[in-house]
Image (cartoon, grey):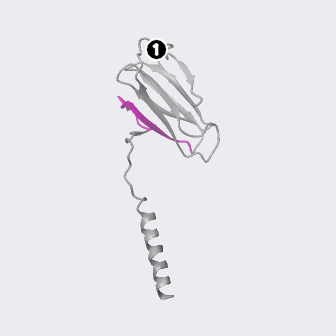
Amino acid sequence: MKNYVSLLLLGVAILFVFSGADCNKASTGPEIPLYSYLDPIIDPPDTFQVAYNLSTYGDKIANVTFKDSAVWLIEKLGAGKVIFKAVNPQEGTTFIIESADTLALKGGLSYAFIANNNNYTDIGNYFVQFTKLPLSYDSFEPKFK
């Protein structure tokens, strides 16, 4: 009986050690830079995210200026009920992004990307990801103006 209890305790100890070994693994994926909507974003990398704090009502605006003209995939990474739109203040145009969309954005212009919690509370932090696509800006249509 004493050997049985010892073997059982040893087995539980081994199980405990191996179950905890997986907890502190280093991230294997690439780190994606994260920016706040509160500060202007100038010349961002080819993939980045913008964090919006939507715990209060109203528009939260991120101003982004891209270095070069390029085609970008813009994806909402959170709740679908959030209204998200791209605005070109120079042209006065607005484009609503439902979940994800591809836009040709001109380099050197400051675009406004606006998130609104649509008067819902308890959303907290909300993330949007931008990914530069390997498509030609010159041949991509339509351009976001």
Q: Is residue 40 visible?
A: no
Across and down, in percent, residue 83 comes to: 60, 32
Single out the residue that lies furthest toward the top.
139
* Mark 1 neighbour density, 10 Å: few (under 14) some (14–19) many (20 or more): few
Q: Is residue 24 left or right of residue 99?
A: left
Across and down, in percent, residue 19 comes to: 46, 64
Q: Which of the 4 image quadrants contains residue 98?
A: top right
Q: Nearer the viewer, residue 16 or 100?
A: 16
Q: How many marks?
A: 1
Q: Is residue 137 left or right of residue 82?
A: left
In this rendering, the answer to whether 142 lies above or below 55 is: above
Single out the residue that lies furthest toward the bottom.
2
Across and down, in percent, residue 58 comes to: 58, 37
| Residue at the spot 36% in from the left edge and 31% down from the top edge | 45
Across and down, in percent, residue 113 comes to: 50, 29
- Residues shaded magenta: 36-54
Residue bearing mark 1: 140
Q: Is residue 24 left or right of residue 100?
A: left
| Residue at the spot 52% in from the left edge and 18% down from the top edge | 92
In this rendering, the answer to whether 4 lies above or below 19 is: below
Q: Nearer the viewer, residue 95 or 137?
A: 137
- Looking at numbered disc 1 in the image, what kind of residue is underneath it? Phe
In this rendering, the answer to whether 54 lies above or below 84 is: below
Q: Is residue 22 visible?
A: yes
> SS of the residue at dot 1?
loop
Q: Which of the 4 image quadrants contains residue 42?
A: top left
